[in-house]
Amino acid sequence: MAGLALKNIHKSFGKVDVIKGVDLTVEHGEFVVFVGPSGCGKSTLLRMIAGLEDITDGELWIGDKLCNEVQPRDRRIAMVFQSYALYPHMTAYENVGFGLTLAKTPKAERDAKIREAARILQMEHLLDRKPAQLSGGQRQRVAIGRAIVRNPEVFLFDEPLSNLDAALRMDMRMELSKLHQDLGATMIYVTHDQVEAMTLADKIVVLNGGIVQQVGTPMELYHRPANLFVATFIGSPKMNLIEVEVKETASGMITVGSQTLDPVAIPAIGAVKPGDTLTLGLRSHHLTLGGEALTGTVALVERLGNETIVNLEVAGGNALIAALDGDTTIERGSSLSLGFAPQNAILFDASGRALDEAVI
Amino acid sequence: MSAKSTSKLQKHTLAGWLMATPAVGLITLFLVVPFLLAFVLSFTNQRLVSPNPTQFVGLSNFEQLLGVGTLMLEPERDDAGAIVRDARGEPEYPRVRDYTRNNPDYLQLSGMRELAAMSWGENRLVFLARDVVFIKAVLNTLAFVAVVAPVQAGLALLLALLINQKLRGINVFRTIYFMPVVVSIVVVSLLWRFIYAGQSGLLNTLLGFLTLGNFQPVDWLGNPATALWSILAMSVWQGVGFHMVIWLSGLQTIPESLYEAADIEGATGWQKFRYVTWPGLRNTAVLILIVITMQAFSLFSQIDVMTKGGPVDSTQSIVFQAVQRGYVQQDIASGSAISVLLFLIVLTISLLQRWLTRERN
Ligand SMILES: Nc1ncnc2c1ncn2[C@@H]1O[C@H](COP(=O)(O)OP(=O)(O)O)[C@@H](O)[C@H]1O
Ligand SMILES: [Mg+2]
């Protein structure tokens, strides 16, 4: 039974600092996703947990064991690589059983474990094939099978789905979720795709520039992003940002407005005074027809069936994206007014940090 | 290039041929023609310069080169039937030449000479060859290939594995190991004559120094027992860097993630080599074995510079003999026949290697 603790982890390659002090606890059995843009250090962090990269500074605890200097094989982890890292000259069966072969596990036991993993992943019929004779999704299964056979405390996945096509990715996502439930093991999963993060994670760790931006459940990140980076990274379409000026502050209420936006009182707490400039964040899905707060010209309409995405050009050259009901009939070029519930709006200060929500 | 100009060029095949002419001409002149000529001449009695017309002689050149036989000699006995012994107590045997010269009962051995002999019970088994020097050249070359191929390939792989590490200053080692390759084999051979020199050669001096003077100097190139192996050691040293680079290119095609996965699975260094590296080098290994084998079969320059086939024919090689016959003895037909034989040997061995190292499913 192993959780994980990272304490002030640093990593530099020569003079370049890639991970700049990460603190994180992962509970046993949790599905944690590291998400962030390409190059932010997700893989590096994962590889440090695996033991494939040295830890420059800080402590890594797996279970109750300090693992900084422990060999990868002794960390009770298994890793699934983006490239699958299957051995081309071995069959799927041999690939899955590779670790057992190395450990000279008796043949019968090895066979039983391989077949059990194949059963879990429904790939019994693929065991005789070599990787070259498998499709991307099937190779992925073999790679996961190899991880399962190790019976690890912690599964590590580095962008395991990014080489698959969209439909397959969705299937595999669901299977991974199910696998997590069935095995009950701790899983750490790296991706640059926020949809994967939202759908899979118990807990998301948003990384940028080697620094943890926010740790939280998918819903926390969606509704209460800690800063502008998280706000725009999580959620699709991207959160709308409007520059606003503080008009008035009252207890638990900050009234803001701008050329674009009629003054509106937002429940938020922060050390701001009238005249300060803030950024107002509004999710596309929180914009509704029938309000009067924002008015503009429709620049583009995308009908997706279940919803209609509208690009609205508002005064001051700003553009907003609204996700409206699928049956809405809106013409390009027409004028449109939208509203929102004030408690759905988020205010960010000049440094990009979100102001605290005031509970009304 | 537009579709139109492509089709225009395709219509004007003449232009294409003209452009290819210099290359095709040179290849024909210096590769195709000599190759075919060697085949044709090996069935004639052509000499380099001769007033007599060339005649077709069938397979006789090959029969001359390859003729071998064995002869079982029984010890001489006196009238009582006891074995006659010489002063040292060794049995005496009849002379070989009594069988190979003008002996109507042994016509098939006529003209052969003794190649080697061994005891066979109280009898003596004699191996005979029509062309003793050539057979020795073949045996030497085969021994050379049989040792050079695995030793050079293995050593090159070892060096490649060593310099494939991410260490500071590793490029210095890469350069050092590769340097002998850049130097001409003729120059290398000349230099190594000093190393191997009999009395005050570098190697003898070094060995004497290391053994505090207990080492008896050896005339490495002048001793039939050491000459071929000395040349072999030098050849391996000279060629190993080249094959190291080929191995290295093979090593670098193996994805790093395969090693990382092996690390996580708990593979030892040896297991990583056995399960990841070696299978990943299969094609490279085939290539290297074939290249080394062919290079080793064409052993010539070292011999020509260092020993000229001596001492006592202990370093004769096939190509050296081909050149000796063809140009020194002006017997083009025999030289051609040797070349054809070499071609057939190399072809057979290459096909055999490919077959042995084929992908098995
Ligand atoms: N072995 C390495 N040597 C030097 N720089 C590296 C190395 N590995 C990764 N980096 C750098 O570290 C940063 C983070 O890389 P990585 O963790 O792979 O990002 P990602 O979040 O896309 O997985 C990148 O800027 C990358 O260039
Ligand atoms: Mg990555």
Image: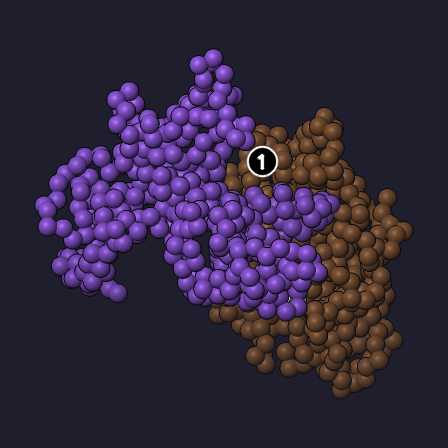
Chain colours: A brown, B purple
Above or below for B189 versus B90: below
Q: Is residue A161 left or right of residue B15?
A: right
Amino acid at the residue labelled 1: Thr
Q: Is residue A21 left or right of residue B155?
A: right
Q: Is residue B183 visible?
A: yes
Q: Residue furthest top?
A: B80
Quadrant in which residue B218 is drawn: bottom right
Ligand 1: quadrant of the figure: bottom right
Quadrant occupied by the C terminus of chain A = bottom right
Q: Is residue B267 left or right of residue B100?
A: right
Residue occupying the point 36% across, 42% down? B133
Quadrant in which residue B185 is drawn: bottom left
Pick the front one: B29 or B43: B43
Q: Position of residue B51 (x, y in %)?
A: 10, 50
Quadrant in which residue A318 is drawn: bottom right
Q: Residues within 10 Å of mark 1 (few under 14, many from 20)?
A: many
Residue occupying the point 35% across, 42% down? B134
Residue on which the image places disc 1: A91
Above or below for B52 versus B307: above
Pick the front one: A220 or A214: A214
Q: Position of residue B355 (x, y in %)?
A: 43, 35
- Which element carries disc 1, helix, strand or loop? loop
Q: Position of residue B186 (x, y in %)?
A: 41, 63
Residue occupying the point 45% across, 22% down? B75
Q: Is residue B294 visible?
A: no
Quadrant occupied by the N terminus of chain A = top right
Pick the front one: A4 or B294: B294
Q: Position of residue B70 (x, y in %)?
A: 38, 26
